[in-house]
Amino acid sequence: MAETGESTVSMEDFRALVRIAGLPLDDSELEELLPLYQFLKNRVDMLHEADLPLGGQAMTFPADWSK
């Protein structure tokens, strides 16, 4: 169940996203993964909505191509 302020994704929309991603999942796998997808989507949405000041600190990670 979604908490206040959280959005939900319909099974049809999730099925379309999975199809576009090219993942061959059956209905039982989709039903099992949908709650996890919704949980992570809500957390990512919160990060995107953060109102950070301009000129704030940023973190970068150099690519380590030697591995």
Image: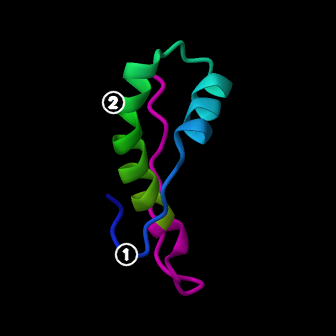
Residue 49 on the magenta span: yes
> Which quarter shows the C terminus?
top left
45 above or below 12? Answer: below
Picture residue at 46% right of the left edge, 76% below the top: 57
Q: Disc 1 designates what residue?
A: 4
Mark 1 or mark 2, earlier in chain: 1
Q: Which label sits on residue 32? A: 2
Give coordinates of residue 42: x percent, y percent. 43, 60
Give coordinates of residue 40: x percent, y percent. 39, 50
9 above or below 6? Answer: above
Give coordinates of residue 18: x percent, y percent. 57, 28
* Outermost bottom residue: 53
Q: Which label sits on residue 51? A: none
- Is disc 2 placed on a helix, strand or loop? helix
Identify which amino acid the numbered label 1 is placed on.
Answer: Thr
Q: Report which quarter residue 5 is drawn in.
A: bottom left
| Front residue (pair 27, 67) | 27
Picture residue at 47% right of the left edge, 44% below the top: 62
Q: Which residues are magenta?
A: 46-67
Residue 48 on the magenta span: yes
> Which quarter shows the N terminus?
bottom left
Picture residue at 37% right of the left edge, 75% below the top: 4
- Is disc 1 placed on a helix, strand or loop? loop
Q: CA distance from mark 1 to mark 2?
A: 22 Å
| Front residue (pair 51, 63) | 51
Give coordinates of residue 59: x percent, y percent. 44, 62
